[in-house]
Amino acid sequence: MSEKRVLIAQAGGIGDLLLALPAMRLFCQAFSPYALELLGYPERLQLISWDLRAQALHSIEAASMAYLFSSSEEWPSNLKSFFSSFEVALVFGRSIGKGLKRCLESSGVKEIFLIDAIPKSNNKHMRDHLLTELKSLGIKGTIDKRPLQLPAEAERFAQEFWQKENINPYQKVLAIHPGSGNPAKNWPPQNFARVADHFAEWAEILLISGPAADGVEEVRSELKRAKPIIVHNLSLLKVAALLKNCVAYLGNDSGITHLAACLGLPTLSIFGPTDPQVWGPQGEEVQILYTPRPCSPCWPKIPNNCARACLYSQEVKMVIEKLTIWVEFAR
């Protein structure tokens, strides 16, 4: 049986991408054997490339892809030539969906599946929504919710990293990412510092910092006991490899939190203005702290005068209690 050339296009955030992984696995299963290529943001796509056995990654930010966001029906010949090489395509989301679908149709792609990346119901989780949408289009198979699989080179990076830090495989590491895509979703830095100080007796602390202002420096300035290992602006694949070696993770509603959960890491996520019933990280060992108020959830229209009581009401004591069983009693 010859392989079908399959394209999956997903240009959302890290969390959106990882919540779509079970749907992508189901889609690939339905068209197996397949030769898969991915379209979106390559650094993010690298996270799932090995898991899906993708053969190539393509950037949605390439100059030729700009036509997908216009109302034009005249597609450059090189773009049509690229898309015409695929027999099947799965497209997630509104931002690229309609333009890409028109271009795929014009290029002669035989089967095109377009699914809305936003749940129509406020009480349906994103992962379940995507699977339901796919099944409604006739895609059948076994839902695969295994932890995210990483390539060997990522595992080697992690091994070398821990050796340089003099951390042996038997030492416990608690990962903390105090940031997110928006400061309005962040638990106070001093609270993260208190948690890190508490567990410094039982574990090494890994503080994960990204390209945006994420509170890591504020956390470090508040520390009294912990001497964390700080990683700044690593590639997502390298962050994933380091997380896989940790005993637990603490973070806000963020892409890195979704990554920790997707890897099967015991994950504690603190939610405030967003709705965990729709956007919560998914995994076998995930706990979410969320205390809704009458105005919750308010994301993305957070009032300017909001005191964020839904977020700040999460007490350090409760966070420590939740993490203790994972950190202190980990093997």
Image (cartoon, rainbow, N blue to C red):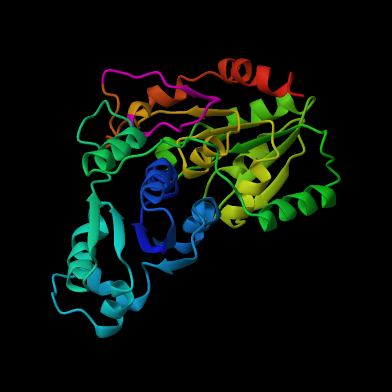
Q: Is the magenta stretch mostly helix, strand or loop?
A: loop
- The image position of residue 66, as x and y in percent, is 28, 73
Q: Which of 148 and 305 is in front in this view?
A: 148
Q: Which of 211 and 96 is in front in this view?
A: 96
In magenta stretch: residue 181: no
Residue 48 in view of the camera: yes
Q: Residue placed at 23% from the left, 58% from the top? A: 112
- The image position of residue 33, as x and y in percent, is 44, 56
Q: Is residue 221 above or below residue 290?
A: below
Residue 224 appears left or right of 113:
right
In the rendered image, the residue lying farthest to the bottom is 77
Q: Is residue 242 above or below residue 297?
A: below
Q: How many labels does the image show?
A: 0
- For the N terminus, the image quarter is bottom left
Residue 139 appears left or right of 156:
left
Q: Which of 102 and 157 is in front in this view?
A: 102
Residue 304 in view of the camera: no
Q: Which of 13 and 51 is in front in this view?
A: 51
- For the C terminus, the image quarter is top right
Instruction: Specify the quadrant of the image occupied by residue 124.
Output: top left
- The image position of residue 107, as x and y in percent, is 22, 74
Instruction: Specify the quadrant of the image occupied by residue 297.
Output: top left
- The image position of residue 250, as x and y in percent, is 58, 31
In magenta stretch: residue 285: yes
Q: Residue placed at 13% from the left, 75% from the top? A: 73
Q: Residue placed at 29% from the left, 24% from the top? A: 296
**Residue interval drawn in magenta:** 278-294
Q: Residue placed at 32% from the left, 18% from the top? A: 293
Instruction: Specify the quadrant of the image occupied by residue 263.
Output: top right
Q: In this view, does 278 lie above or below 212?
A: above
